[in-house]
Amino acid sequence: MGTWGNGPFDNDGAADFLGAFSAAPARAVASALQAVAQAPEGRAIDVDEGSAAWAASEVVALAYGRGNRVPLTGPVLSCVARLKPSEEQRQLALGVLSRIADPAFSELANLWHGGQAGGAFDESLQNLRARLEAARAGVRRRLTVKRGDVLVLHADGSAGLVAVQALGSGEVAVFAGQVSDEAAAMRLVQNQRARRVLASVKQLLRCGRIVGSAPVPQSLCGKKLYAHEVGAFEEYLVAGANVIGATLVSFDEAQKHELFEPLDQAAIRRVADGVWRPRRVRSPDEREAALRARFREKWHERRALTSPEPFGDMSMLEDLVAWIHEHGVDHAVHGFHDIASGLAGYGRPNEAAERRSYAFAGIVALWRGTAPQDRWPDALRGRLPEAPKGRLMERALVAARMLADQAITRNAELRLIWDEAPDRGRSLRAALARLRQELA
């Protein structure tokens, strides 16, 4: 794992979860919790699934105002501010905690207990469970900050105060310089220009106090747009501070706007001191290079456990076959057709989901009779799902052709994994070329 820390948001799985959360909060929480809750009994919960579920469970508690008094980053608080408390999610989170706490089936718990911090991990989950249980009583009332309210924060390393004005729940105006008292802060707000930045006013209230209210200057009214990097390397969007009405844009357009990056108290001080500079979105090449560096070790491990063939991940294939038998071939065909058409699916890069689509395309080639039957693994002999007929088979073939093409796009983690192999991905491209020919 590239990042590993003591808290629910201090690891790679949580970082990926927060990335999805910023775009669709309720959906991201539900997806992270259901990935663990709906996993078959006895199946190991991998570390990324467990980490995302832990972070999602903490977010559910935070939505009820049941934090654990540990300082949170601006991105976390900004996301939580957009999530409504949900009794269904609270119950789901309680069930999920039991699964990720068991070292016998949770890779996350196993890693913690493999060192000296297993007790601390158990205590963290017990604390979270207690807060989720307490949330049964409802949302804990918190002091609210209104637009126009002025807060003062203590300047780091001095007796000075930094003045900020709330523009919304996730956006503030930071006034230049430091002041000595509250009256001076109010005069500063009335007489000085300010820099408009993203920050959670709830977080700032934890380290500051409200000293009054003043009209928001005309120069700070209106909507300021910020740029986001979203799932695929070449996808960007711009939106206001509340992320409502987001618009997909090109990289060149996204670069014109500041990166959507909520600031913490320390960064707010740098803004007041005039030494903070906003960041811009990374180019597609920079984003891909960063992902390669982050997951190089993990991808090396995946290549040792899998092959570039359609049925090259036996664990995933067994789960897929069991799922098709449980839900039926009709359901599987329509589901994969929706994924291929972009009507449903997942954020890319995502090897697990890509592998399912790639394997389904391979199954269709077997159904069609254009792929050799001995390609089907001996371990699953006799368990190949029955081929659909008529128009359903035609629909499956259309989906398979599209899915095979998508397996090697720029935003496919499957491609990234095998590009790092000694043969630079030639074996994956050869396997895909055969599959495309069989589906032609």
Image (tube, rainbow, N blue to C red):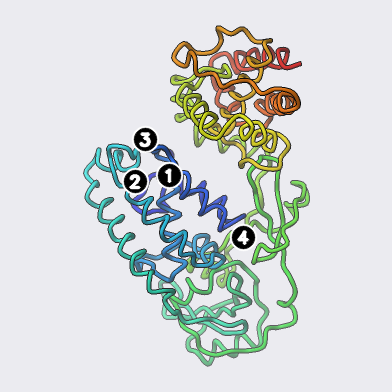
Q: Which residue is mark 1?
A: 36
Near mark 4 (Cα within 10 A), the count class, few <14, some 14-19 or many ≥20, is few
Amino acid type of disc 3?
Ala
Q: Which mark is residue 387?
A: none
Point out the tag, 1 or 3, that comes first from the N-terminus.
Answer: 1
Which mark sits nearer the N-terminus, 3 or 2?
3
C-alpha separation, residue under disc 4 versus residue under disc 3: 44 Å
Residue position marked by numbered label 4 in the rendering:
277
Dots 3, 2 in contact, CB < 8 A: no
In contact (CB < 8 Å): disc 1 and disc 2:
yes
Measured in 3D between alpha carbons, the distance from the residue under mark 2 to the one under mark 4, in whole angstroms, is: 43 Å
Which percent across, then down, holds residue 177? Answer: 56, 77
Where's residue 88, x and y in %? Answer: 47, 60
Secondary element type, mark 4 = loop
- Answer with the quarter of the image where residue 402 lies: top right
Given the image, on which type of amino acid does mark 2 rest? Answer: Arg
Q: Nearer the viewer, residue 416 or 439?
A: 439
Which residue corresponds to mark 2? 99
- Separation of residues labelled 4 and 1 (CA atoms): 40 Å
Tell me the kind of residue under disc 4: Arg
Label 1, residues with CA under 10 Å away: few <14, some 14-19, many ≥20: many
> Residue 184, located in which quarter of the rendered image?
bottom right
Residue 222: give x, y in percent of width and height: 75, 74
